[in-house]
Image: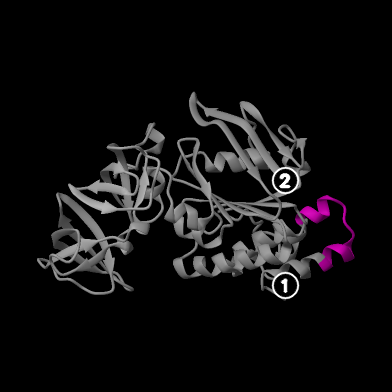
Amino acid sequence: MPLIELIDISKSYDGELVLDEFNLKIKENEFITLLGPSGCGKTTTLRILGGFETPDKGKVLFQGEDITNLAPNKRQLNTVFQKYALFPHMSIAENIAFGLKISGKSKDYINDKIKYALKLVNLNGYEKRSVDSLSGGQQQRIAIARAIVNEPKVLLLDEPLGALDLKLRQEMQYELIRLKKELGITFLYVTHDQEEALTMSDKVVVMNQGYIQQMGTPEQIYNEPENAFVADFIGDSNIIDGMMMEDRVVKICDHVFPCIDEGFGKKTPVDVVIRPEDIIIGKPGTGIIDGVVTSNVFIGVHYEMCIQAGGFEWLAQNTTSYPVGTHVSINVVPENIQIMNKPQSEDEEAMALDE
């Protein structure tokens, strides 16, 4: 039995459908991330699970029991918000103890829990500090400490690292992974940041327009996107019109490439996904398509280049720099060519640039 089950959840705001018969199962002790652009329904899903919103249709099950209409404070779930929601007039200890005092726990029990929670988030000895004296990262840790001190079975995190700078955000990602392992509880994490999702999750749920586009491990989501939206949203991609000639043979830009996909039929229009890091650049005539480098930008660990070849502008990443104007040839090994069916609906399409 799954720990949490969302069954046929629908939710609208002012007549606009945000979730449409949404279904999701979450196992115990998983780190699940809901990933998608603004307005895709991920935060609404989390708020329904936390009890802060009621679905128009459908139900929420927790360990097999219907909790759809149960108040947030009655659920075995705690939420950490992006804006921390700490009380500035209270000390750190008072902030952490807030929920425990409401539930009538003893003073000794509360003091022990405060010390335990602060140790978990690496802030030993901060009991008497004020909220205003802490950095953004420290405040976020206190918000997490306050959430875990009640020993919830599930921790809901709504873009909790969004207000932090890049270095601190990366540090907190590893902190959350460590906390999840130490506590042994289920994490449901909401973000629009692909790197966060790929770094921390056991399973990623990619959402768009109120629908799940794909669910799988970070490796599956990145290496085997199921549609153009997922391929475009997760990392950089070349998404190209192709023709599946037969099993293991695809035509791209009027050139034939071997691939490993089967079952698409013969002469079937498809979308082809090739990651920039998988493009092999060589001398003219050594690959499948010849072209010319039209732009070259150094971005730290590699060069990012655009190559005009076969009527398509390819995005390529390489540790070797090829100056603008260089004539090159490109190739891709069969295992790195991902074949997808053409989008069947608008939510499966790659995002437009203005979105």
Residue 228: image x %, image y %?
Answer: 36, 43
Of 90 and 179, the residue lying toward us: 179
In the rendered image, is residue 163 in sight? no
Q: Count neighbours of disc 1 (C-alpha within 10 A) and say few if under 14, some if 14 to 19, many if 20 or more.
A: some
- Residue drawn 64% across and 59% down? 88
Q: Count neighbours of disc 2 (C-alpha within 10 A) and say few if under 14, some if 14 to 19, many if 20 or more.
A: some
- Residue drawn 12% across and 66% down? 284
Q: Amino acid at mark 1?
A: Lys
- Residue drawn 71% across and 57% down? 185
- Residue drawn 46% across and 51% down? 192
Residue 232: image x %, image y %?
Answer: 36, 49
- Mark 2 secondary-structure assignment: loop
Q: The C terminus lies in which quarter of the figure?
A: top left
Q: Name the residue that disc number 1 marks.
A: 119
Q: Earlier in the sequence, mark 1 or mark 2?
A: 2
Of 351 and 306, the residue lying toward us: 306
Q: Is residue 128 above or below residue 272?
A: below
Residue 281: image x %, image y %?
Answer: 22, 67
Q: Main secondary structure of the magenta part?
A: helix
Residue 292: image x %, image y %?
Answer: 12, 62
Q: Which residues are magenta?
A: 98-112
Q: Name the residue that disc number 2 marks.
A: 3
* Count of numbered tags: 2
Of 103 and 28, the residue lying toward us: 28
Q: Amino acid at mark 2?
A: Leu
Q: Is residue 100 magenta?
A: yes
In the rendered image, is residue 321 in sight? yes
Instruction: Examine the image and state in which quarter residue 263 appears.
Output: top left
Quick check: 104 left or right of 51?
A: right
Say which of marks 1 and 2 sits in front: 2
Q: The N terminus lies in which quarter of the figure?
A: top right
